[in-house]
Amino acid sequence: MKNYLNLILAVAFFAGISACKKSEEILVPSDIDVTYKVPQGNNAFDQTIVNYYNTYGTYLLYNFTERDAYWTPTGWKKPVVSATGTWSVGADILAAQPDGIQAQLDLIDKSLFSLYPKNFLKQFLPVKLLLCSKVDSIFTTYVFNPTYSPAKGVKKIPAYFSYDNIAVNYGDGSASTLSAAEKLAFLARINQVFFQSINDRSLIKPTTEFINSADYISVNTSQAAAFSKGIIGAYTSISATIDWNAYVMAMVTLSEADLNRSVANSNTSAVGILNATKDTNGLIKKRYNIVRNYFINTYQVDLQLIGNKSRGM
């Protein structure tokens, strides 16, 4: 069934649901062909791509359309400029160059695939990994001369998640020449984006133990008050799901040294959440262990080892 994934444009509700699980079939009007097939060519690396599909059920595409990258049930996500000169947030991407793909695949394998059990990747990777020669984050910035006005902000990034795909950078021949620091930044970003995709698709929900271990009813008047209750998400808008995702992202993106550093409890970042300065009642450490142990026991994935590795530890 995974050989033929069809997207329905007219019925956004069903498309939204089907994007959450790769194994579900999506219907499409008969005059639109959006079937994905691998191999896409006869290069030496195409067999590697086929092997990844056979193992994980995810398509690694280097021939793809803008529709593959930007279409979602809620609208077209390619960044555009408004009448007032501001830009919508998103990413500009270009397909990988064939002579840069082998090194890019090696980088993806070392930075993502090799860090997780096969079954975890098979269950949680999105439908598509788009192999790109460019992934630029687009946003609105402002210039001051000759007048104060909005302008297009552009920042090169290693990877970007959108709906049912992750766009991966460095398929321009540069993957084999990245510095050690750049490789660490790539590893950190692609794993962050991978878990962002899992969280945004609501594929792993907070456990009952986690939900019952904090007070989500009482109003918090400060971040310090939230920390004292074991809640690390922004105190102004919090739920068990938001908090669970915050714990996951803290482990995936920060090292244990980062989490144990002493940082003022007015600081809203996850840095220092395991230090007594923020964790005044020891509840953050307790809930941290609930999340960490859940992933270890359920999926054989230690999230903190990912965060440590992303920081060169």
Image: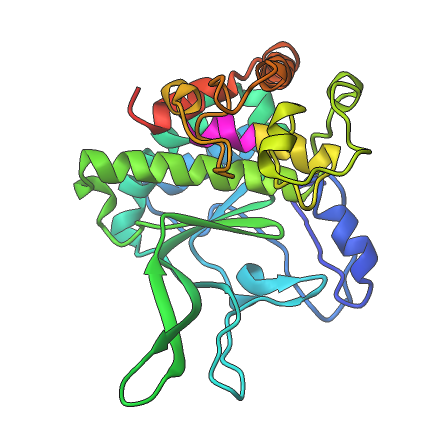
Residue 76 forms part of the magenta stretch = no
The vertical placement of 150 against 48, above or below, is below
Q: Quadrant of the N terminus?
A: top right
The vertical placement of 108 against 214, above or below, is below
The percent coordinates of residue 137 (x first, y second) are 41, 60
Q: Which residues are magenta?
A: 248-254
Q: Quadrant of the C terminus?
A: top left
Q: Residue at x 54, y 17 (%)?
A: 301
Secondary structure mainly formed by the magenta segment: helix
Applied colour scheme: rainbow
How many labels, in total?
0
The percent coordinates of residue 285 (x first, y second) are 57, 15
Front in this rendered view, residue 173 or 288:
288
The vertical placement of 110 against 75, above or below, is above
The percent coordinates of residue 57 (x first, y second) are 59, 35
Q: Residue at x 30, y 49 (%)?
A: 170
The vertical placement of 305 against 271, above or below, is above
Picture quarter containing residue 233?
top right
The percent coordinates of residue 251 (x first, y second) are 50, 25
Q: Residue at x 71, y 43 (%)?
A: 20
Front in this rendered view, residue 120 or 217:
217
Question: Can residue 36 be seen at all in this image of the molecule?
Answer: yes
Front in this rendered view, residue 167 or 281:
281
Residue 252 forms part of the magenta stretch = yes
Q: Residue furthest front?
A: 221
Q: Residue at x 18, y 38 (%)?
A: 179
Side of 174 where 68 appears, left or right: right
Question: Can residue 124 be seen at all in this image of the molecule?
Answer: no
Picture quarter containing residue 240?
top right
